[in-house]
Image (tube, rainbow, N blue to C red):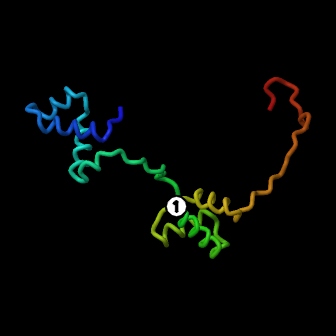
């Protein structure tokens, strides 16, 4: 359940004015201690405005490669066209101080059309074996 700014302030006032221990007061109110202390910390830092709900941050993924790093990988690949994605990953890790995998380099270069798809050879199957078996356990 979400509490409004005024409700949070009321809970803080009740806890401050209570003769009971904080733990007992919060237990009677049905509010988790960590939630109360988070509210209290925001109140101590920013006053009444700190109790207002903040808009959630946009989703940030911890493992997404930033766009400047992608651009840097492309620039390095254009400078060193004879290196494979795996060699580029080693070069970047050794020279630029951050770790990037060979598969990540491959995906980045593939998204910029710097890696061509391998040529596939289509092999068709025959209708029957050239040397069919004649007995049960014959290989």
Please indicate whether residue 134 sits to the left or right of residue 73 in the image: right
At a point 10% along the width and 31% down the height, the residue shown is 20
Residue at label 1?
66
At a point 44% along the width and 50% down the height, the residue shown is 57
Q: Position of residue 117 (x, y in %)?
A: 75, 57
Q: Given the current orientation, which residue lies at the most extreme top position?
A: 136
**Res 115 → quadrant:** bottom right
Q: Quadrant of the C terminus?
A: top right
Q: Is residue 23 above or below residue 69?
A: above
Please indicate whether residue 67 sits to the left or right of residue 84 in the image: left
At a point 61% along the width and 72% down the height, the residue shown is 75
**Res 91 → quadrant:** bottom right
Q: Quadrant of the N terminus?
A: top left
Q: Given the current orientation, which residue lies at the most extreme bottom position?
A: 79
At a point 54% along the width and 59% down the height, the residue shown is 101
Q: Position of residue 13 (x, y in %)?
A: 17, 38
Front one among 60 and 72: 60
Q: Position of residue 130 (x, y in %)?
A: 91, 37
């Amino acid at each position: 359940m979400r509490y409004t700014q005024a409700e949070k302030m009321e809970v803080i006032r009740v806890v401050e004015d209570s003769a009971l221990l904080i733990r007992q007061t919060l237990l009677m109110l049905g509010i988790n201690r960590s939630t109360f202390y988070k509210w209290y910390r925001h109140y101590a830092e920013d006053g009444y405005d700190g109790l207002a709900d903040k808009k959630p941050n946009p989703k940030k993924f911890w493992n997404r490669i930033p766009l400047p790093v992608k651009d840097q990988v492309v620039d390095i690949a254009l400078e060193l066209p004879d290196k494979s994605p795996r060699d580029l990953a080693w070069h970047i890790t050794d020279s630029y101080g951050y770790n990037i995998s060979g598969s990540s380099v491959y995906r980045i270069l593939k998204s910029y059309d710097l890696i061509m798809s391998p040529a596939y050879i289509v092999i068709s199957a025959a209708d029957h074996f050239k040397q069919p078996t004649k007995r049960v356990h014959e290989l």
